[in-house]
Image (cartoon, rainbow, N blue to C red):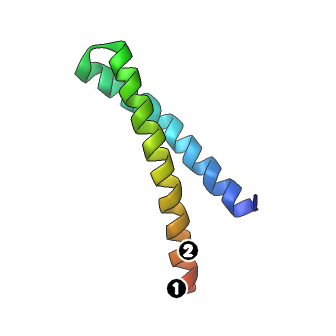
Amino acid sequence: MRGVQKDRLYKVICWRALSFFVAGIISYYYLGEFRTSLELTIILSVTMTCLHYFFERQWEKNKNERGH
């Protein structure tokens, strides 16, 4: 894996780890049930991590094509 890809992956994982805890707290507060909150948080975190990674990848591709 190239350096840029490693950096992107590390950035995405760090951000998603933080967002996992925030989403867990919010979903628990809203749902009031630990297990359901945890399930929802895991589903959202996995989905959003994948989307974030591909978004970053496409963003960089577009940026490179524009010559920035």
Please state the horizontal and vertical placement of residue 17, each as a whole percent of the image.
Answer: 53, 35
Residue at image location 51% in from the left, 68% down from the top: 58
Q: Badge 1 local density, few (<14 within 10 Å), some, or many (20+)?
A: few
Q: Badge 2 local density, few (<14 within 10 Å), some, or many (20+)?
A: few
Please state if 31 lies on the left or on the right of 57 as rendered: left
As displayed, is residue 37 above or below residue 50? above
Please state the horizontal and vertical placement of residue 64, each as a whole percent of the image.
Answer: 58, 79
Quadrant for the C terminus, please. Answer: bottom right
Residue at image location 64% in from the left, 48% down from the top: 10
Quick one: SS at disc 2?
A: helix
Q: Which mark is residue 27?
A: none
**Three-letter amino acid code at the position of disc 2:** Lys
**Residue toward you, 50 or 64:** 50
**Residue toward you, 17 or 38:** 38
Please state the horizontal and vertical placement of residue 1, each as a whole percent of the image.
Answer: 76, 58
As displayed, is residue 5 above or below residue 46? below
Please state if 3 lies on the left or on the right of 32 as rendered: right
Residue at image location 36% in from the left, 28% down from the top: 40
Q: Residue extending furthest left?
A: 30
Residue at image location 45% in from the left, 53% down from the top: 51
Q: Is residue 14 visible?
A: yes
Reading the image, the residue beneath label 1 is 66
Reading the image, the residue beneath label 2 is 61
- Which numbered disc, 2 or 1, marks the residue that appears first in the sequence? 2
Q: Is residue 68 visible?
A: no
